[in-house]
Amino acid sequence: MKKFFVLVKKEVKELLTIQMILPLIIMVIVFGFIGQVMSKETAKIAAPQSILLLNQDTQDSLDTISGILKENNFTVSVFDKNDVSEVIKEARDKRIPVVMVIPENFSQGLKDFQPQQLSMYKVVQDFSLMASARYNMVDQAVKTINNYFSDEWLKEKVGSIKPEILKTPIAVKEFVSIDDKVANVSFSAVMGFIQKQTTFIPIVLFLVIIMAAQMVAMTVANEKENKTFEILLSSPVSRKTIIFAKLVGAGIVALLFAATYMIGFRYYMQGMTGGALSGNEADGIVSSLQALGVVVTPMGYVLLGSSLFLGVLVALAIAIILGILADSVKSVQAVTTPLMVLILLPYLLVNFTDFGGLAPFAKWMIYAIPFSHPFLAVGNLMTQDYVSIGMGIAYQAVIFLFFVVLAAKIFSSDKILTLKLNFKRKK
Amino acid sequence: MSKVLEVKNLNKNYGDIQAVKDVSFDINENEIFALVGPNGAGKSTILKIVATILNPTSGEVLINGKNIHHNADSIRKMISYLPEEAGAYKNLTGIGYLEFMADIYADNIQQKKEYLEFAKEISGLKDRLQSKIATYSKGMTRKLLLARTVMSRPKLAILDEPTSGLDIMNGYEIRTVIKNLAKTGMAVLLSSHNMLEIEFLSDRLALINKGVIKTSGTAEELKMKNQAKNLEEVFMKIAL
């Protein structure tokens, strides 16, 4: 047992180099920084937006339009000259993103039931997603202006029925049902909330599994190339101890990386979603989720952690064999590519398709890939389907044992030194 | 003198290629035995089989009378192997590497201490043992690895091209260390294609070509038998 810990310590020391740690720390800092920036930008969008009005019509028109805009969280400034190019220049100088021009006879035309035209100039100074969100808010405000005047017309023409009833005679009361539980909440609200809580989990899983596999394949190939393996294999330590020490050493480093990634992503996601939901809204959705049974329990987190750890271990066991196959350290990338595909495929199919709606063959193919189960576990975690997670874990354990036994067999035979994939063109 | 190593009718095939053909030799205590031959002659394969890394296709290898493939675990405590042009863990310091290997070989703290002291002395690296191996020259790495190989005072040290690629000074120092270690009771099996090194180091040698031992004996015996001035001439006469 002492030799096992000595080997694990060596593995961890070999893997945790400054070259490995530094990018990780930088990643957390960068994600934290992005999160902070995003948080500020989200807050900016939630704050009142500026709009510049150029009124070529009566004071009545200006009062009506600016009133509607103010109700829609806009800060309205009025330009007192009648030159569009000047107003655009003014908007650019003051970094006001939108100029709206109320044309002559606007009010009168509407009173006469004549369709009117509001000119809108979007003064673009950047092409960020936040700028796009800002312009979407203006479009939303124009819809509100339209609604206001169509309501006025309806009141005038069909006075006996309220305009909102005329426009939406059918109201929808939305319920979400999961398993046998039902809650009065919109699906988009539930989905949005869940995604905000769990989006980063599959990304972290994906990154950690890939990183761990490449790391261990690299160390095996490196040991083979440097012949440190030959020294180790001729020393009084069993082959199984060498394999398990490699697995545990890389597993510890992988978990450390996973924890760091999680912290980085949490900062990032907090920044992204920080100002999106008010406390009351969030509380309402949380209580609806509880009614639906969509709650992550400590047991759920333990199972997800187990599934992730086994996923990493399976990747490591396969990567050890792939590392043996590598002709040199340089060819590690090539030999580990099939493993990357096996990780990428379930990541995409589970997270970006309707997995339940896939053809049975495709579904079973995904179930057969051991790396699918941590991704599937994220969804099952929400619905507390612990049986499915448990079955996935059991399957991963079987696959892990298979590859460990295979690796042990290779380590105990000549193949440890003779097995290799040669990518050089045969002459 | 008791036999430390006995190799009997050893054969090793890699697929269709017969790398080692019916090789037999033995080594006594205090003896340096060299396998001499060109690249691809089968020297490294024999050394790897003796080091318990490769399995023979047929034949028998005994260390201290025990068959190495039936008693690999206990045999590995008696032997130590230095591969040709081997490296070490570059992120460890020299002393960190020696401590790691001492932990692997030693049964207790006292033994580990003894191994470390001996390795420090053999390596001659002094303060540089505190530096990372990544900063070592080829000669320094080789000295560190030789110190690692002999630190546990194995019954049999297996050294594959111990001075390959080293300058005159480093090569000489390593050869002197090996010679002195043999005087303390250690048996040494080494391979080389450097005939001068072999004449200086070995008590007995075997000339090997294409997996077959062509002749064996002391350097003087072989030169006399083949009426040659040096081992190079002996080899050319036998190989052709």
Image (cartoon, rainbow, N blue to C red):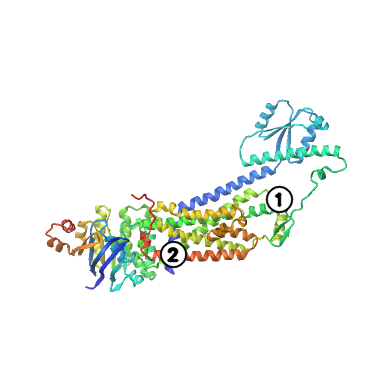
Q: Secondary structure at mark 1?
A: loop
Q: Callout 2: residue from which chain?
A: A
State the image quarter where residue B123 is shown. Answer: bottom left
Q: Secondary structure at mark 2?
A: helix
**Label 2 to label 1, Cα distance in Å?**
54 Å
Against A230, residue A192 (above or below) is: above
Residue at position x 60%, y 62% in the image: A301
Q: Callout 1: residue from which chain?
A: A
Q: Which quarter of the rendering shows the N terminus of chain A?
A: bottom left
Residue beneath disc 1 = A278
Q: Assess disc 1: are there few (<14), some (14-19) or many (≥20) residues with their C-alpha within 10 Å of its C-alpha.
A: few
Q: Position of residue A403 (x, y in %)?
A: 46, 63
Asked whether residue B93 appears in the rendered view, the answer is no
Q: Position of residue A258 (x, y in %)?
A: 54, 56
Asked whether residue A378 appears in the rendered view, the answer is yes
Q: Nearer the viewer, residue B27 or A21?
A: B27
- Indicate left or right for A342 with B4 as reference: right
State the image quarter where residue A242 is shown. Answer: bottom left
Residue beneath disc 2 = A406
Q: Assess disc 2: are there few (<14), some (14-19) or many (≥20) residues with their C-alpha within 10 Å of its C-alpha.
A: some
Camera-side mark, 2 or 1: 2
Give, as a three-letter code, the residue at label 2. Leu
Label 2 close to label 1 by CB (< 8 Å) = no
Mark 2 and mark 1, same subunit?
yes
Give, as a three-letter code, the residue at label 1. Ser
Q: Position of residue B122 (x, y in %)?
A: 30, 61
